[in-house]
Image (spheres, rainbow, N blue to C red):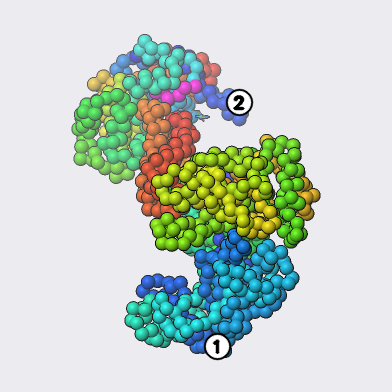
Amino acid sequence: MIQLKNIERSYKTAAGQSWVLRRINLEIEQGEFITIMGPSGAGKSSLLNVLALLDDAWQGEYWFREEAAHQMKRKQRGELAKKNIGVVFQSYHLLDDLTVRENIDLPLSYKDIPNKQRQGMVADALDRFQMVAKKDLFPSQLSGGQQQLVGIARAVIHKPSLLLADEPTGNLHSSQAKEIMELFLELNKQGTTIVQVTHSEANAAYGSRTIQLRDGWMVSDTAHPEFVSGAAVVNQ
Amino acid sequence: MTRLAQHLRYALRQIKKSLAFSALVIGTLALGLGATAAMFTIVDRVMLRPLPYEKADQLVTIHETGRRGQLNGSPFLDIQQWIERSHTLDEIAFYSPDNHGAFLNGKTASIQVAAPGISANLFPTLGVQPVMGRDFSTSANRMGVLPDDKNSIILSDVVWRNIYGGDRNILGRTISLNGEPYVVIGVMPRGFTFPFGGAKPVVWRAAVLGKNDAVRKKHVSPWYAAIGRLKANATVASAQTELQGIQSEVAKLYTDPYEREDVSTIQVQSYADSLLGTDLKKLLAILLGAAALLWLIACVNVTNLLLARSTNREREVALCAALGAGRGRLALQFFTEGLVLSAIAAFFGLAIARITVTFFSHALVTRFNIHTDLTPNLSVVLALSGLTLLTAVISSLLPATAAARASIQPLLNQQSSQAGTAKSKHRTRSLLVVTEIALSLTLLVGCSLLLRTIYQLRHVPLGFRTDHVIVANMTVPSYKFTGRDIQTELYQPLLERVQHLPGVKSAALMTEVPLGKTFSMVFTLMPQGNTAAAVRQRNLSAQFRAVTPEMQQVFRFRMRAGRFFNEHDTAASQAVVVVNSAFVKAFLGDDEDPAKILGHQMLSYAKDRPAIVIGVLDDQHQVSVAEQSQPEIEICIPQLTPTSSLYQSAEGIKMDIAVRAQRNPATLILELRRVMQEVSPELAAGNFSTMDQIVEDSYGSQQFAARILEVFAGCALLLCIAGIYGLLSYLVAQRTKELGVRIALGAERKNIMWLVFRQAAWMLLAGLGIGLTLAYFSSVLLRGFLFGVQPQDPWIMASVSILLIVSGLAACALPARRAAKVDPMVALRYE
Ligand SMILES: Nc1ncnc2c1ncn2[C@@H]1O[C@H](COP(=O)(O)OP(=O)(O)OP(=O)(O)O)[C@@H](O)[C@H]1O
Ligand SMILES: [Mg+2]
């Protein structure tokens, strides 16, 4: 489904060029549930931003299905992301001024979908995430877990084939985290490809494949146990 | 004390820290304060101009008022009661104001003068006495004039000099006023006039009391205007109180109950106040209101700016509060900052006021005859300080309360977002911007209405050309030419030399150029009988002008019928006059062919020299652009000789020279002045102007008001744009995270920009709605000053709205672009 070839990402800092992602080669198959792990500052969020097509400033090749995202203009990437990708954030990033219903509706409002169909989709999502009773509440009136449920509902409302989640349970209790993970598993079973970033082994256990990042290098991949990156060799 | 110093020091540090912000605040306030101070200066000068009387501030007018409002005057008996009973007034004098003017007769033509009849104590009350001769002699009751002086007259300096050539033997001479003989008994000092501000030259007759003055009866007893002098320790208010008490006794003396109701109360007013026309007062009030509006807009803007900053400084404030600073102290801190900013702004505002007033000084001179220095005086500075303090209070009120009210806990706790307070603050700020838009719209509508008025006035076809014409007003030194023909000795040589100046196409003399304000003579007819034509002609009052034939080449007007004067009209040829269409209408009736008047005998140049009408001018706006053409009759200067009865008044008082020239007015004026000086030194003191300027000046108050409102409305628009821009920039900055989320969720550039524009559109629409309502009602105040446009002109309302919308949207273009450029990665990184 997605093929990353030699993805590189760096920032210009006062000290010069600082590398965040190094020669990332990664193939994501349709229907996988991938967990990205690694120490703080390893570049997990950076990789996710590349995958989400939010970042524009990387080098390398990014193939989404047969399409070459690396050759696209910003607008086209936006279109591609809008159609295929949903994102769940660690701190939910719900809009305070909008109700639960309106928050969920937000991605649809940026697509050309007839109003009728939009309402139907929102109603379905509310139903599916058991939020019907809360649809007119504001985010500040919800618990953390509930807020993240809304965040997920918002991320999948337009039925993306790829769901990206950056520490989706980082701010939650373990019981709430478990609930979220069950939900991810469920979505995955229904065919959504999922890439999540987490620090928790328990969460990682829900996934089908785990990738380790260190200092921007990919150092291991459970799908390819034989894989050892050059950097790992150097470091060890 | 030390605490205050500490506050001050802290405030100064804050100002230095955010220099750009402070500059914006100071600039905004300076604009508002400057405009207000300028208006204060102008109002101060117009309302409180110095009068040529001793201790003029002690002079008051006294009017009886009642059921039908203020009466024009009072019978002598009432005035006598006041003076006998009053302890607040030193003296009360009276006069019968001469509203229609009188004619100081020459042999065939007359000069219009004002000839009020005055009580014997008027001049002493005003603190003046004749420089030559004597005052009227006082009768036993100390106010009336002895009957011996019934036919005595006192001349003003202007009349004595200009009409009688400053004749030192004038005393005892008999002159004719409205056909009656009067003996000149005195001449008043130079510069003295009364009543103040009249345009006509003045002579004074005596108010000799008669038997009708011994009764109080409407239409029987003559009425007089009363002017009194306050005792040194009295005030207008105390005199008012006292006279009101007296008046209730006086009213009882009226036997007729209806007449009694008309005089039940009294109004004492300072004489200076009473001089301002209600029109002018209204105009000044409107302009002062406009200035206040601009100041309010500036305050709103500043409040908004300070509010924005207080939001940014919330954490700092919270910290101070947590460290034990009381809320009152925090509020005081904000207040001190506002005060310091306003003080600096006041300084710049004063400079702006200075410049503004200089900019308007020409208008002040031509409109209000104000020649005094226009530096803001002490009262203006005081008023400005008051305003500054008010500004500080108002513009720090909101931020101060916001700071004092801010709850401390959530602010220190970085995690929790304070959506609630932030949102209510946005609302306050949006409301402030909406207010600003509404107020600006009101100013803009007022300004546009006046500009439209000026435009309409400018496009009134005048009937003559004004371009490339230069005018010099001359006061004629006729005393130098006694016994000589001023025509051949002064005018002909002058005209010839001017016509030969380089670039001059033609030059003409006339007693007054069209639309001039220097000198006016009126021609009236006295037909006998009671036929309709006789009645009509008795009502005819025509502008009278003596002109040279070249006037047509200078002003390039057209004739309706017949011809204009030409070089063949000389002292030896048939005497001729020219009239205009309005004159024909008034003379012959509405539906007559103008050509019919040609050949008619009208007026005589001398006893045996009757003139005939040889031409009819097309109507011109020769008196006022806004008014219809007035009847006019013109005589030909070359046909006048010293033996002519019109000679003195037509040639010997005032003369304008109008020059058509294809060259730079400034250098031409220099040469003109030189030539005039060479011909007769006194002429060089003349006033020079272009005809276009004279036309502009004739627009009057509208022009002046439009200019001021132009400045005000321009500032308001600027402030408005700044306000919208400021708020939206702030909102975009505040909403960076939200915008990032939206972009991450698929919002495109256009969606994001629309979000910002929508915010602006909402404020603009609300502002327009309120503003249009305000403008709809407030523009009615301007009604009396408009010409060719209605106060609620829909086109003006629409175009001003469009102007505001366009500028408003332009103001949000930059913030919108900034919003669209938000990088979601960066936005989401920051919590
Ligand atoms: N805008 C930026 N400018 C400079 N350096 C940046 C920027 N954003 C990220 N980095 C650097 O990139 C590196 C990787 O950051 P990233 O957020 O991807 O780490 P992470 O693996 O998600 O860490 P965490 O587990 O703490 O979230 C870090 O060293 C960070 O300092
Ligand atoms: Mg991260």
Q: Which of B734 and B769 is in front in this view?
A: B769
Q: Measured along the vertical axis of the image, is residue B391 above or below residue A57?
A: below
Q: Name the residue under label 1.
A: B141
Q: Mark 1 lies on which chain?
A: B
Q: Which amino acid does label 2 sit on?
A: Gly
Instruction: State whether the magenta stretch is mostly helix, strand or loop.
Output: loop
In the rendered structure, find residue A67 and report the number of the disc placed on it: none
Instruction: Find residue A159 and report its horizontal and vertical position in percent.
Output: 27, 23
Name the residue beneath numbered marker 2. A16
Crowd band around label 1 with a 10 angstrom C-alpha radius: few (<14), some (14–19), many (20+): few
Please name the residue shown 46% across and 72% down the image. B72
Rendered-image quadrant of the C terminus of chain B: top left
Q: Give the range drawn in magenta.
A: A51-57
A54 magenta-colored: yes
Pick the front one: B598 or B422:
B598
Please tell me which residue is depicted at 58% across the width and 28% down the height of the picture: A13
Instruction: Please state which amino acid type lies under the numbered disc 1.
Output: Asn
